[in-house]
Image (spheres, rainbow, N blue to C red):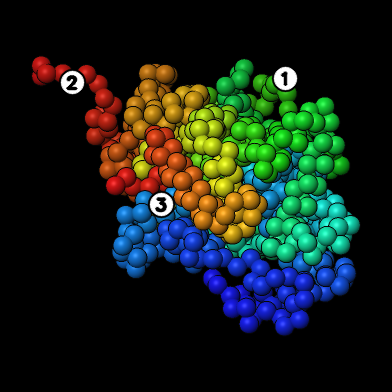
């Protein structure tokens, strides 16, 4: 912390001694410790509050009070640095590695997704470019590589894996299979409209989009993308739906079995990922892509972190989207059942077409999630099969212990439902707080 | 660290002899920290219009123009000197782009005059919120941002500023002291006080994550 003056060049003819030297004596001891702690954290050393508290026992109380605040500030800063490099309206990119960029297909806070061609192997790929360019890149490089490795390890037919990743001109990117599908958020909004039917060729967005917007069309601005996540927005108009295409239909408002099949595929992919010690952490409609054949692709494992918890401190980053977030995550806890919950809420919105929690204000919403008492789906629409409702309620119980304990159990029940067999879970009614009836 | 310092000293000596190349090397060494500062200080209306790299490029030209002042102005810390130049450049750019609100723009960027409450705290709460909701959730973010805004506004300007300097610009205590033109001891105390206030704010917000366990 203090440098000897001897370290300076002898010929320092202009400046007085010890430039930028910090005089530790006159600083408050706690602040000195905090600075050291901050510095270690910035260098990725993962300093432990307990360690400090032990080593500097005479300041233990202050250390325990202040260090977590500093740790939290630093983490927040790190997370939000991502938002700094606001997405330029147009990326000056034609070529990334061996991928030739064709057009932009989606945007989110973390980056932009392009459709691209990989010339050597002649395949269509999606390239997710992280939206920041950062001279001091070590911090993000680490996170990026970690993310890439997590996803690369996952091989499942319902998970959008990655082929490769790399860096060019300060832009980092993943190369992923191109999924010709749309986000379930888009599906839900379509089901809310007029006839409430989605046709297969609407999902094959490529053609429709190409007509509407050539590769040179200006990309959407960052401001546009603030309002929704990855946007997979096929260009279409309502009148394109006509009766002759009814066999072409992928999903309808009352396609309960299709919805169950969607849930099943996601549950299976979660079961697999959990088995690989990976949580998704951000299951929500926008991260689930449906293709024209009804196949579901779970994407954006960007927020996935290894299941095993580092001992000691919480490193909870509430990065998922609030509305789909399990209540325990507000207490800094999460496990496989938190993903199951998020899937349950997603299915809830699919069957009811309304948000499970409707609070407009942040605190309202958090309160509703924690109280965990949304209307039963069948109260909103009595046509929903009782067993499907039970499965959903089972997934979204406020208390994790009341939920399916594994994604496998949920998948099994969905299979039973699809096979017209009795589902196993029956306990669910208890979670819905009703006036307790004394008379029996 | 000492290696770094002696390297810096060699460069400083060259700059004092008017070596522009040495000034460029010094500047490059601080570039990422200055870049961070520009991003943090940029008025929200300029974001997306002005690129941090362009600001730094312009600031670099200003630094070259002032190389004669280096001996006097940069004697305490080269970094703080560069930071001051970048800050002034940023003010000019704000004026240029937000012409009609010239006075506001100037006020918001000035370091000693204090940011207008809204500018720093908006940026701060933006930081604080970043992890809470996905960036897409602008509406929710604004909601919480307002709450934090109110909370952060209750801090004094200098407390808010010292938090920004130490955390978001990653200045050392000594650098923060120089920027704020107070003693190191004063900066040290200011920082702890501001942190303590922030801690109380965080504890008061229900459901706020990363809340330190209350004793």
Asked whether the residues under the numbered discs 2 and 1 touch, taking CB atoms below 8 Å apart as contact, a structural biologist would say no
**Residue pictured at 34% horizontal, 59% vertical:** A59
Front position in the image: A152 or B52: B52
Label 1: which residue?
A239
- Position above or below: A378 against A322: above
- Looking at the rendered structure, the secondary structure element under dot 3 is helix
Secondary structure beneath dot 1 equals helix
Check the image and report above or below for A261 versus A281: above
Sequence order check: which comes first, mark 2 or mark 1? Answer: 1
- In the displayed structure, does residue A423 sit left or right of residue A323? left
Q: Chain of mark 1?
A: A
Residue A238, image x and y in percent? 70, 21
Q: Are marks 1 and 3 on the same chain?
A: yes
Residue picked out by circle 2: A436
In percent of the image, x 70 and y 57: which residue is there? B80
Check disc 2 and report its element: helix, strand or loop: loop
Q: Which residue is mark 3?
A: A66
Name the chain letter of the residue that bears numbered label 2: A
């Amino acid at each position: 912390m203090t440098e000897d003056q001897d370290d300076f060049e002898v010929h320092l003819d202009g400046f007085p001694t010890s430039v930028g030297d910090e005089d530790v004596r006159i600083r408050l001891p706690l602040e000195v410790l905090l600075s050291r702690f901050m510095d270690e954290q910035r260098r990725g050393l993962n300093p432990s509050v307990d360690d400090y508290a032990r080593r500097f026992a005479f300041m233990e109380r202050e250390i325990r009070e202040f260090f977590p605040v500093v740790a939290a500030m630093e983490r927040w800063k790190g997370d939000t640095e991502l938002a700094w490099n606001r997405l330029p309206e147009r990326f000056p990119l034609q070529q990334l590695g061996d991928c030739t960029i064709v057009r932009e297909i989606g945007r989110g806070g973390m980056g932009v997704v392009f459709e691209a061609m990989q010339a050597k192997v002649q395949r269509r790929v999606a390239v997710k470019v992280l939206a920041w360019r950062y001279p001091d890149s070590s911090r993000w490089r680490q996170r990026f590589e970690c993310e890439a490795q997590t996803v690369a390890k996952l091989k499942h037919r319902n998970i959008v894996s990655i082929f490769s990743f790399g860096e060019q001109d300060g832009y980092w990117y993943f190369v992923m299979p191109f999924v010709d599908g749309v986000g379930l958020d888009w599906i839900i909004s379509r089901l809310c409209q007029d006839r409430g039917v989605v046709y297969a060729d609407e999902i094959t967005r490529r053609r429709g989009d190409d007509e509407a917007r050539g590769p040179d069309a200006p990309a959407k601005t960052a401001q546009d993308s603030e309002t929704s996540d990855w946007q997979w927005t096929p260009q279409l108009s309502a009148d394109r739906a006509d009766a002759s295409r009814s066999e072409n239909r992928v999903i309808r408002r009352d396609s309960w079995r299709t919805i169950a099949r969607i849930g099943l595929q996601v549950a299976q992919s979660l079961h697999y990922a959990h088995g690989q010690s990976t949580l998704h952490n951000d299951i929500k409609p926008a991260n689930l892509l449906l293709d024209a054949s009804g196949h579901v692709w779970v994407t954006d494992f960007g927020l996935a972190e290894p299941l095993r918890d580092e001992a000691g401190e919480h490193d909870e980053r509430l990065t998922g989207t609030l509305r789909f977030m399990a209540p325990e995550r507000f207490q800094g806890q999460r496990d496989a059942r938190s993903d199951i919950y998020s899937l349950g809420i997603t299915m809830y919105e699919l069957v009811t077409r309304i948000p499970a929690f409707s609070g407009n204000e942040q605190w309202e919403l958090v309160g509703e999630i924690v109280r965990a008492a949304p209307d039963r789906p069948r109260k909103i629409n009595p046509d929903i099969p009782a067993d499907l409702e039970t499965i959903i309620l089972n997934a979204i119980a406020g208390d994790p212990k009341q939920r399916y304990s594994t994604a496998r159990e949920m998948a099994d029940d969905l299979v039973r439902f699809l096979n017209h067999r009795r589902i196993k879970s029956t306990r669910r009614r208890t979670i819905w707080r009703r006036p307790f009836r004394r008379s029996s | 660290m000492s290696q770094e310092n002696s390297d810096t000293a060699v460069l400083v000596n060259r700059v004092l002899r008017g070596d522009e190349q040495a000034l460029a090397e010094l500047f490059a060494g601080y570039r990422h920290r200055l870049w961070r500062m520009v991003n943090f200080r940029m008025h929200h209306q300029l974001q997306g219009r002005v690129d941090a790299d362009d600001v730094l490029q312009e600031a670099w030209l200003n630094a070259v123009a002032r190389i004669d002042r280096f001996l006097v102005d940069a004697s305490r810390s080269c970094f703080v000197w560069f930071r001051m130049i970048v800050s002034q450049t940023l003010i000019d750019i704000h004026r240029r782009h937000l012409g009609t609100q010239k006075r506001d723009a100037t006020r918001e960027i000035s370091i000693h005059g204090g940011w207008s409450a809204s500018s720093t705290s908006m940026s701060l709460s933006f930081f604080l919120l970043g992890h809470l909701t996905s960036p897409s959730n602008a509406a929710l973010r604004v909601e919480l941002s307002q709450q934090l805004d109110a909370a952060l506004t209750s801090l004094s300007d200098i407390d808010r500023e010292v938090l920004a300097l130490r955390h978001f610009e990653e200045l050392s205590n000594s650098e923060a002291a120089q920027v704020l033109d107070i003693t190191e001891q004063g900066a040290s105390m200011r920082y702890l006080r501001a942190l303590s206030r922030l801690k109380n704010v965080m504890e008061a917000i229900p459901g706020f994550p990363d809340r330190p366990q209350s004793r």
